Amino acid sequence: MEYPFFGSRRMAVQLHVNRKRMQRLMRIAGIEALYPKPNLSRPVPGHQIYPYLLRGVVIERPDHVWSTDITYIPMRGGFLYLVAVMDWFSRFVLGWELSNTMETGFCLAALDAAFGRGKPEIFNSDQGAQFTSADFTGTLLKQGVRISMDARGRCLDNVFIERLWRSLKYELIYPGDFADGPTLRPALDRYFDFYNHHRPHQALNYKTPADLYRNGEARKKGLS
């Protein structure tokens, strides 16, 4: 945990053991180095790509911009994919879902959960097949939402949700020992509740995402 970017080669040197033994021990412990994973964002020919709308935009209120992304969750017995929808202003996680495939359905389920809380003016994603599919973009367009997409290879265009993945993996996934989806799902439910309601964020002046999201919603409704 002190050097999460060390792979088996550096770990073997650091601990003065054979590399093959180090690889075996890392597999048993479910440890892997933090490094860019294979790109989960794969465009599909024929899917419509929308321009990036957020360059130079100042985001000053909840539900101005939402974003989404998919990440890879390693477990003892395999892996799952996790998608989340986040409000950019408050960093509030509005919806999430797990899947053992990259089909679009789990992304639509997370989006539907997010729409249960509100509606953004702009929705940002990468150019992955799930987010450029007619089902996904059609759902946004029916709600009157403007669609924005990152440029290819520009993960920093979606930097806030990338930071969410980093926090999640450092604070829950890597220290934990999740055997399968049924053990992972309740842990994620607890973590996102903690992240939204109890985890102060330095970038938010040590307020929680819920503080900013709730207060912003109250101002919009004239309640404060």
Image: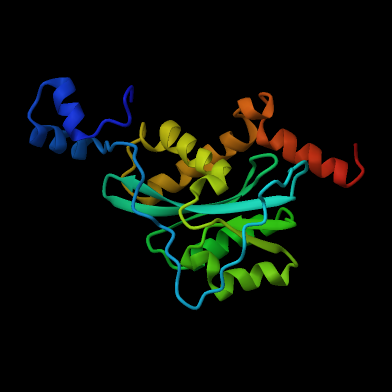
Residue 44's place in the image compared with 83, above or below, is below
Splitting the image into 4 quarters, where does residue 161 fall?
top right
Where is 155 relative to 130, above or below?
Answer: above
Q: Residue at x 56, y 65 (%)?
A: 108
Task: Point out the residue furthest to the front here.
Answer: 56
Q: Residue at x 19, y 34 (%)?
A: 8
Residue 68 picture location, percent across and down: 56, 53
Residue 119 at least partly seen? no
**Viewer-closest of 181 and 196:** 196
Q: Whole-percent x and y of residue 53?
A: 67, 56
Could you tell whether 199 is left or right of 31 in the image? right
What is the x, y in percent for residue 7? Answer: 23, 34
Q: Depth check: 43 or 111 in front?
A: 43
- Tell me: 192 left or right of 98: right
134 w.r.t. 191: above or below = below
Quarter of the image for residue 179 reads: top left
Which residue is nearer to you in this view: 25 or 194? 25
Observer able to see residue 20: yes
Residue visible at 34% across and 40% down? Answer: 35
The number of discs equals 0
The N terminus, quarter of image: top left
Q: Which residue is situated farthest in the bottom direction here?
A: 46
Q: Quadrant of the C terminus?
A: top right
Q: How is the image coloured?
A: rainbow
Residue under the point 27% across and 30% down: 6
Indicate the position of residue 197 as horizontal and vertical percent values. Answer: 64, 34
